[in-house]
Amino acid sequence: MEIDKDLAARQEARLLCRQAEEAQKLLGKFPQEKLDAIVEHIAKKFSAAADELAWLAAEETGFGNATDKIAKNRFASEKVASAIRGMKTVGLLRKIPDKRLWEIGVPVGVIAAIVPSTNPTSTICYKALIAIKSGNAIVFSPHPKAIDCSLRAARIVAAAAEEAGAPRGTVSCLSLGAMAGTQELMSAPEIRLILATGGPAMVKAAYSSGKPAIGVGAGNGPAYIHHSADVRQALACICRSKTFDYGTVCASEQSIIVEKSMEAAVRQEGAKQGFYFMNTEEAGKLAKLLFRPSGALNPEIVGKNAVFLAEKAGFSVPSGTKVLVANEQEAGPTRPYSMEKLCPVLAFFVMDSEEAILQKAIEVLTHEGAGHTFAMHAQDRSAVEKFALQIPVSRFLVNTPAALGGIGASTNLFPALTLGCGAVGGSASSNNISPLDLINIRRVAWDVEETPQKPTADDDLVAILTEKLLERLKAK
């Protein structure tokens, strides 16, 4: 008898949520020291499995490359663990004597975590660490294209958590890859918060679930090479970013914007570093490959290298080509190069003035990517300040590879694989999501006004005599 996959997926989600709720009732009572010990053990075990999981993810999804996925796995375990080491998340967080306030960290409860196919294993480790650090249980819903590697990662994390003393069910993962299971998970009464990393449709579903949710919007960050920039260094940063796991990090640059006076220098240096500037015919061929007629990104191009993409589109490029670049001047739904492309492909905007560049960057981000990330390469701090005050993003990166800077690998931003886009991007947070986003703060507040004095015996006697006097006057 054939099993109804949707029904089985819903039942699995219900069971895991119930188990997670029971586990969290115990976990939520753990002191900070015990939670920290669990987190450290998970990070250690996951880091040891970084290579295995990377190869599994690259083979199963076909996105990116194993070498960079190893780096992602170590980032998600070692760097995240280091960043949250010593952070206070539960119990009495601080006392503020001059305000007569205490702040107490309270876990939100059970978290539903959506896992993307582009960063499946690393996302599982990162979300598990920040959830358990803050006393929460977590149930993962992996992408159907990354079921095996996600399950393997979740089982490593769950086993490590239990070895270190976490209750069974603290970490679990849906196994059937059915949308019905994900829907059941997000609507389950045990779920208190949804942590959604994935495509726009999935993030929208999370926000429509009726549950509190932290989601992320599309990344479509422009990179502005200012006339004060070191052009060689700027292009080296962009190349490193766009080739890291072949462009699957949402914070990676999607376009380069320069003034007309900088165009020749950027083209010349770019050619030296493996940037291939396509002609009109080549760009047209690739554009047809990038997106489906519906406007959705073609999954066949996600996380593929530049040479493969050119061959697939029907033209050849030098063997050392690392990034494909197309001339562009407009942004909108009919301009594929102005949108997010999760592969080593960039739009190239050449504008007449700095003001035109500012407006073009805003136009690109307003079309797609508002609230996410912008990169600027410049030595002129006044120019950086001018743009930083006006560009509608949550991460404004300076002189760094955007893919690495945005997630906090090459900057001092919190190391995260869920990047909030703020209200302008339709997100509940503009943070690189950390354990502090996964707790509630209970505030204990003392009275600061003068306490009214209790009436004395003399006051009581005066009141009685006054009342009797009034009664006599009324009788007359």
Image (cartoon, rainbow, N blue to C red):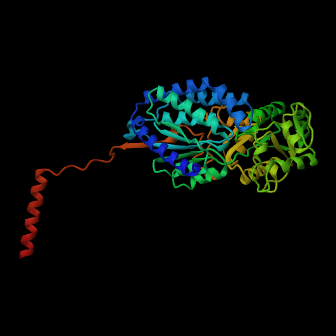
Q: In this rendered view, identify the residue nearer to me: 334 or 462.
A: 334
Q: Quadrant of the C terminus?
A: bottom left
Residue 205, compared with residue 101, is above or below; it is: below
- Quadrant for residue 90, please give it: top left
Q: Position of residue 134 (x, y in %)?
A: 48, 36
Across the whole image, how many numbered discs are drawn on residues? 0
Please name the residue shown 70% across and 45% down the image.
219
Seen in the image, is 339 located left or right of residue 454? right
Seen in the image, is 438 located left or right of residue 100? right
Residue 476, compared with residue 440, is above or below; it is: below
Q: Position of residue 386 (x, y in %)?
A: 72, 44
Q: In this rendered view, identify the residue nearer to me: 259 or 414.
A: 414
Please name the residue shown 69% across and 39% down the image.
118
Residue 65, compared with residue 328, is above or below; it is: above
Q: Position of residue 305 (x, y in %)?
A: 81, 36
- Quadrant for residue 384, please give it: top right
Give the residue furthest to the front. Answer: 1
Please name the residue shown 29% across and 47% down the image.
450
- Quadrant for residue 104, please give it: top left
Q: Is residue 226 visible in this depiction of the protein?
A: yes
Q: In this rendered view, identify the residue nearer to me: 385 or 367.
A: 367
Q: Is residue 262 visible in this depiction of the protein?
A: no
Please name the residue shown 54% across and 47% down the image.
194
Q: Position of residue 393 (x, y in %)?
A: 67, 46
